[in-house]
Amino acid sequence: MLRIRTLYISLALLALVAGGPGAAGLARAAEPVTIWAGNPSQKAVALTFDDGPSPIYTPEILALLHRYHARATFFVLGERVEKYPELIRAMLRDGHEVGNHSFDHDRLTKLSRPAWQGEMKELERTQMDLEVLGCPRRGQLMRPPYSAFDDRLVSYLKHTHRGIVLWSVDSGDWKGLDAQAIEHNVLDRVKNGSIVVFHDCDENGCKDRRPTVEALKVILPTLEKAGYRLVTISELLSRPPR
Ligand SMILES: [Zn+2]
C-alpha cells in the first residue's frame, strides 16, 4: 500500500499544469512534477479513473458524471484508446480531462536503456493518439502505472512539459471491494483538494467494475450535497492559494 502524502506545489507548476507559461517556465520550475492533491482552501475534489476506457463501464460512468454535473479526469491506456477512440471523444465532449497512463500498463521504472526507450516511444504514441482525438497538446498529465516513478521518468516528463498526477484518496476498488466499502473509503477520507482514484477497467482487461459504478451512485450525490465542486485535475490546480 502506498503511503499517501501531500506535496505543496509551486505557483509556477500550478500555472504550467493549467496550460500556462510553457517550456521556459517549466524548465525554471524548481520542484517537483508530482502532484498528490489540490488546494485545501477550495471546496473542490477531482475524481480520476484509471486503466480505461472500457466499452462496458466507461459509458455508464460518463452518464453518472453527467447526471451529477461532475467533471473528472480519465488516465487511459494507449492500446485501449486505439481500440475505443469514440469513448475518448465522448469524455472530451462532456468536458472531462484525459491523461496518459502509458500504452499497455508496463512498469516504467528499473528498465534497461533500450527497454526505457521503447516505453517512452509507447508513451509518445499514446500522447499522439490523444492529441489526434482532440486532447490539448500543452499541459498534458501523466499517471504512471502502479504509481511507480523514478528520477529518470520525472526528468523526462519535466523536459517534455508534463506533470505526474497521483492521488490523496484511494477508493480501493482495485482490490475487488464491494460498493459499500468503496463508498466508505472515499466518503470517510475526502476533503478539500482531494484527488480520488477509481478504475473503470484494469490492466488485465476489464475486471468487474460494477462495484465502482454502484459506489458512484452514492458518492456523487453525497459529494454534491456536501457542496463539493467535482472538477478536472487542471481545474483543481488552476486556482492559486489565496
Ligand atoms: Zn493503472
Image: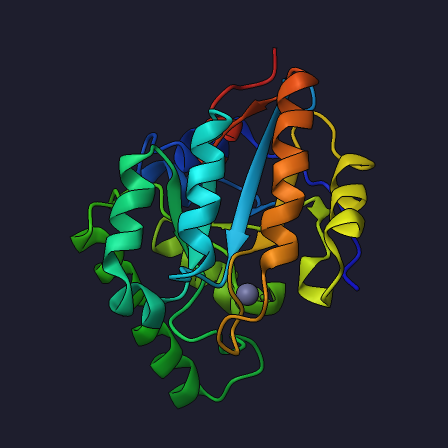
User: Is 159 rendered above or below residue 116?
Assistant: above
Residue at point 38%, 71% (across, down): 103
Figure label count: 0
Q: Is residue 169 left or right of residue 150?
A: right
Residue at point 49%, 66% (across, down): 153
- Looking at the image, can residue 37 be seen? no
Who is closer to the viewer here, 146 or 196?
A: 196
Residue 179 position within the rendered picture, expressed as x and y whole percent measured from the top left = 72, 51
Residue 73 position within the rendered picture, expressed as x and y whole percent measured from the top left = 46, 43
Q: Quadrant of residue 149?
A: bottom right
User: Is 40 rendered above or below residue 177?
Assistant: above
Residue 71 position within the rendered picture, expressed as x and y whole percent measured from the top left = 45, 32
Q: What colour scheme governs how the chains and residues are painted in the rendered image of this protein?
A: rainbow
Residue at point 48%, 45% (across, down): 61
Quarter containing the C terminus:
top right
Q: Is residue 39 left or right of residue 33?
A: right
Quarter containing the N terminus:
bottom right
Residue at point 70%, 18% (across, down): 226
- Looking at the image, can residue 209 be seen? yes
Q: Quadrant of residue 91?
A: top left
Residue 31 position within the rendered picture, expressed as x and y whole percent measured from the top left = 57, 44
